[in-house]
Image (cartoon, rainbow, N blue to C red):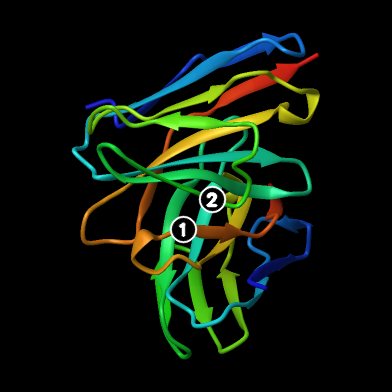
């Protein structure tokens, strides 16, 4: 039972490159979230998915797209990376019937 | 506008020296206030949820309390393993459980 897994752990991109951050969970949770964490800014919600095939914007969605093709996986895509997207990205899930979010270990992304 | 402010930004304690962390919030209709612990290089780990003024929850050396404008995380007789960043968040999304986080308090407990 791995919980929430994220790949890759680290990534360096050049400005303008694209990439997809992957998140997978084996807890059968319906809701999934993508956050970014920056020094002095705290965690900020990028996108949210209540269930397979549904997504909704959070506080800071510009420059990102998401995909929830099945219950287990929720991916975050950067189409044209910018230095302002340098951050640590966390995926989280929500256990049904509770308010407790489970976070993955994070992906540290640097855009040069 | 919904907002969460934590203080202090950093706190250094001696082992056994009790203290409190503060989280003040402004939100239109509180649907839950959350405390998380985050260790370096890891994702946040859930500690508590509080829903109404006067509510208290405890876990080992930690106790969270809630008023209409703020929450406190009391740490009694801390140990070095309590060193971490403590994050406060409020639910602004209702059933969707969308959270707004504060910037955290970095706690260092020295032996």
| Residue A16: quadrant of the picture | top right
Relative side of B38 to A62, left or right: left
Give me the residue at 48% from left, 65% from top: B34
Q: Residue under circle 1?
A: B98
Relative side of A49 to A35, left or right: left
| Residue A53: quadrant of the picture | top left
| Residue B101: quadrant of the picture | bottom right
Give whichever of A46, A9 is nearer the camera: A46
Disc 1 to disc 2, how far (Cα)? 8 Å
Q: Position of residue B38 (x, y in %)?
A: 56, 44
Q: Residue under circle 2?
A: A58
Q: Where is residue A39 in the image (x, y as percent from the top left)?
A: 76, 41
Give me the residue at 50% from left, 17% from top: A20
Q: Where is residue B26 in the image (x, y as percent from the top left)?
A: 64, 78
Give me the residue at 60% from left, 52% from top: A59
Label 2 residue SS: loop
Q: Where is residue A89 in the image (x, y as percent from the top left)?
A: 57, 31
- Check contact, mark 1 vs mark 2: CB within 8 A: yes
């Amino acid at each position: 039972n791995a919980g929430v897994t994220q790949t890759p752990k680290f990534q360096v991109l050049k400005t303008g490159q694209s990439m997809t951050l992957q998140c997978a969970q084996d807890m059968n949770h319906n809701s999934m979230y993508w956050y970014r964490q920056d020094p002095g800014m705290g965690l900020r919600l990028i996108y949210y998915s209540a269930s397979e095939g549904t997504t909704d914007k959070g506080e800071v969605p510009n420059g990102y797209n998401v995909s929830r093709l099945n219950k287990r996986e929720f991916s975050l895509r950067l189409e044209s990376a910018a230095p302002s997207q340098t951050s640590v990205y966390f995926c989280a899930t929500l256990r049904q019937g509770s308010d407790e979010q489970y976070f993955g270990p994070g992906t540290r992304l640097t855009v040069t | 506008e919904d907002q969460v402010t934590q203080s202090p930004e950093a706190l250094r304690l001696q082992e056994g020296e009790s203290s409190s962390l503060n989280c003040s919030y402004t939100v239109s209709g509180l649907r839950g206030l959350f405390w998380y612990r985050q260790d370096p290089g890891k994702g946040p780990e859930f500690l508590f949820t509080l829903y109404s003024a006067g509510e208290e929850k405890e876990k080992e050396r930690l106790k969270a309390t809630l008023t209409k404008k703020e929450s406190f995380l009391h740490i009694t007789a801390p140990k070095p393993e309590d060193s971490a960043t403590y994050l406060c968040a409020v639910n602004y999304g209702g059933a969707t459980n969308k959270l707004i986080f504060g910037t955290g308090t970095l706690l260092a407990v020295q032996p």
